[in-house]
Image (cartoon, rainbow, N blue to C red):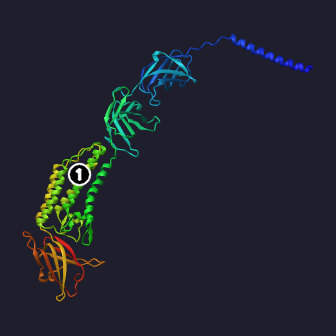
Amino acid sequence: MNLRELQRRGWAVGWICLLVLGLGAGRLTAQEQPPPTPAVPPEVTGLDKIQAVRGERVRFTFDKKDGWPKEPKDIHVFLGGVPAGSAVDLNTDALFFDLVVPGCSPYLPLGAHAVSVTIGDPPVPVIVAAAAGRLEILPNNGGIDPKITGVFPVTAYPEGKPRQYSLRIQGEGFARDACDNRISLGGEAKEICWKGTGCSQGILGEIPQSGLISLSNILLGDHSLDNVGIKVGTRPESTSAIRLSRVSRQFPVRIALVVSLLIIGGVIFAVGRSNLREIGGQKFGISRLFIDAETETYSLSKLQFFIWTLVAVSAYLYLSICTWLVQGKLVFLDVPDGLPGIVMISAATTVAAQWTQSAKGPKGAGGLFPTISDLISAGGVVVPERFQFLVWTVLGASIFSVLTFLHDPGSIADLPTVPQGFLSLMGISSAGYLGGKMVRKAGPVIEQIQRTSIAAANQIVLTLTGRCLSTEATYRIRAITVGAVTTPEIIPLSMIVGGKPMGKAPEEPGMDSTFVKVLELSLQLPATPPAWASGPGELTIINPDGLADTMTFP
């Protein structure tokens, strides 16, 4: 081993010895130092109040200022183990810090809670004396029991799909902090997603003003809900009846009208389509049920009967559907008072009108085919009592229907009461209508016209068959041409052979002596015969009292 190798090894051994000596000396020095004395943690000694409502300040006092942080945000308070927030004010000279009792977020239930405090990060527990160990959160409701004074709407109807409901609960003693109002529906406590808490699912709740709670997005389960309850803290619960309809507000109206129209329309359609009737070149199907068979005009008595029947059926169905589907009562309803009276007056008027026509004769057919004007006229002449009867029928039926369908389905228990005065007025109007038929003379009704030509004498004979054809009548006649409209012309007496038509088959005894069932009208034609002399025409007979009828002839 040469000298250089010995030097290298010597240096290595020297460094190792120095390192060993240094470690040994450091260890001896550490063993000679005494352990640090642990610091006494600060202590919360008291609270300025042991009960507080949400949002109220509570002052925490402590024993010394040593150990407390400089920033209040570094002091954290827990109530019942739930973070209640950080201090909002800190004064180490006056030895206190303040806490604002939290609202609904984070939610701390009402009642007494154990108090604990930490400082710093990582948190260091602080001693809390027994005098500051509990804080009770009280409801902010004035210290009175909650009381529900009203629920609106009285009946809640579903909105959207799935069916959702909304309620407004009015009362007193409700907590101003929404989360302290515990809501139950149908006796079952519900979690409410209150506005401002960041929740957006489930039943949504809001307090728009004092004494009013708004709930929405309520879903109806398999069973109907019949009550809502509110409980605040340990106060007694207040409940109120509610009704959640399974159908919409418009559903009973729609179903009642549809079913009524199907019932009545089905009967009318079956009868109308079974035998179409042609009058004046026009075919009548469904509307033939409103046509008087003898005069071939629209019958006012039949129309008012069908109107009141439709109103009665639809109103009764509406009441039944509301009772079944909205109110949840499965009962067979009795016919409400007032409705039988109207139906009785309507039916009696129809029967009496038919009897009067049989006894006194027809009213007069009027135009060639039925028109709406038949309802207020007889034989083409406007009759005041018919107009009055029609007006009161339409007005009464409309008011009764509107009052019925505007009634809330959740609270309707009976149909509108028909005032006795209105029933009397309906009876008087019906009596006036029937009285007019009794005192007025019968009108002409032409059933058939036959034309016979007498070429040698340049004459034609029109034979009218029907009822109440007066031999003192006047006549209008016109030609029927395709693509042209001609004005009816009055047949002058000079054209009538003998100046007067010949009457045959007198009417029933007691009727006008000029009335016959067959009337022969012999006409002397001019040198240039009119178009109706050889082609189709239209003849109108006008009795002396102005009642008329029109019929075509080939």
Measured as percent of width and height from the top left, residue 509 is found at: 7, 70
Asked if residue 137 is positioned above or below residue 34 in the image, the reply reads: below
Looking at the picture, tell me which residue is in the foreground, 2 or 359. Answer: 2
| Displayed quadrant of residue 442 | bottom left
Q: Residue at x 21, y 74 (%)?
A: 551
Q: Residue furthest bottom?
A: 456
Q: Relative to residue 503, is residue 298 drawn left or right?
A: right
The answer to whether residue 436 shows anywhere in this view is no
Q: Camera-side residue: 320 or 206?
A: 320
- Quarter holding the N terminus is top right
The residue at 22%/85% (across/down) is 529
Residue furthest to the right in view is 2
Q: Is residue 363 left or right of residue 149?
A: left
Image: 96 above or below 280: above
Q: Give me the residue at 13% from left, 70% from top.
A: 545
Q: Is residue 338 visible?
A: yes
Look at mark 1 in the image and give the residue it sits on. 400
Q: Secondary structure at mark 1?
A: helix
Q: Circle 1: is it few (<14), some (14-19), or many (20+) Cα within 10 Å?
A: some
Residue 303 lies, with reference to residue 231, above or below; the image says below
Side of 79 relative to 121 (left or right): left
**In what quadrant of the picture does the C terminus appear?**
bottom left
Q: Quadrant of residue 413?
A: top left
Query: Residue 506 location in percent, x, y?
Result: 9, 74
Residue 9 or 363: which is nearer the viewer? 9
Residue 39 x/y as whole percent: 58, 14
* Disc 1 residue type (three-letter): Phe
